[in-house]
Image (cartoon, rainbow, N blue to C red):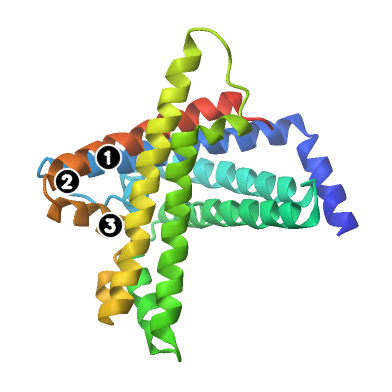
Amino acid sequence: MTSAKGAARTAQRSDAFRRVARAGFVVVGLVHIIIGAIAVSIATGGGGDADQDGAMEQIRSTPVGGLVLGLVAVALVALAVWQIASGLLARGKEPRKWGMRIKLIGIAGAYLVIAGLALIFAFGGHVESETTLRALSAVILDAPGGIVLLIIVGLTVAGVGVGFIVIGFTRGFEKTMDVPDGPSRPGIIALGVAGYIAKGIAITVTGLLFVVAAWTQDPEKAAGLDGALRSLVDLPQGRAILWLVGVGLAIYGVFSMVRARFSRM
């Protein structure tokens, strides 16, 4: 652990590494803006996959898509390493410190998954996250106690989503940023509130679909983010709701880009 902490301190003291890690927030923002735009397109009768692999497909379709995806992967790996380093160097009493480590490592894992997707698409590959999640759900359901396990997975994911919503309402994201005073402050806070709430709604619905898949014993119900967003259309005024969530996800993307400048690193 001592050597790991030493490596973490070395990484965090590097200005060059810090700049690359900050670029990771820009990349996260870009991905969310694309997902949000696809969600809005679906709400208005268009198509596309409103998830991470849909965003990667959109980036790859540009003339320099392969290069951009490679840069996306590098920036996200750097940001993931930064999160892990922050977890290793977390301070405070043991329960709080380990809770922070688990949270930051979980965030790092999410960044690494997206980085992996970027590399796959950069080299001409293709991944269908919906197919993967449905296959995983089927495996879990076939395991002993699989229904309960999948419900736990779904509730855990939904809990993460609720956490995002709470952070949005309470403006908890301000604790991780040096939000400047002055005329730009209200705008930055508004971006954070709207973005976190929209992202939280999307994640919560994604988790609830796992619960539905477990309850009905139908892994096809676990359709990931794209399926979660499309399921909003079935609600009363569903297209309007999906449009608002899509705009909110794009706003979260803009906020992530702002966070690249003001995040405490």
| Left or right of 133 in this view: 38 | left
SS for callout 3: helix
Q: CA distance from mark 2 to mark 1?
A: 9 Å
**Residue at the extreme top of the image, as rendered:** 182
* Residue 137: image location, x then y, percent: 37, 77
- Circle 1 packing at 10 Å, graded few (<14), some (14-19), many (20+), is many
Q: What is the quadrant of the N terminus in the image?
A: bottom right
What residue type is disc 3 on? Answer: Ala
Q: Which residue is mark 1?
A: 246
Q: Nearer the viewer, mark 3 or mark 2?
A: 3
Mark before the other along the chain sequence, 3 or 2: 2
* Residue 149: image location, x then y, percent: 45, 79
Mark before the other along the chain sequence, 2 or 1: 2
Relative to 135, residue 14 above or below = above
What residue type is disc 1 on? Answer: Gly
Dot 2 and dot 1 residues touching (CB under 8 Å): yes
Q: CA distance from mark 3 to mark 2?
A: 12 Å
SS for callout 1: helix
The residue closer to the viewer here, 222 or 132, is 222
Q: CA distance from mark 3 to mark 1?
A: 12 Å
Q: Quadrant of residue 261?
A: top right
The residue closer to the viewer here, 67 or 16, is 16
**Residue at the extreme bottom of the image, as rendered:** 144
* Residue 143: image location, x then y, percent: 44, 89
Q: Which residue is mark 3?
A: 228
Q: Which residue is mark 2?
A: 42
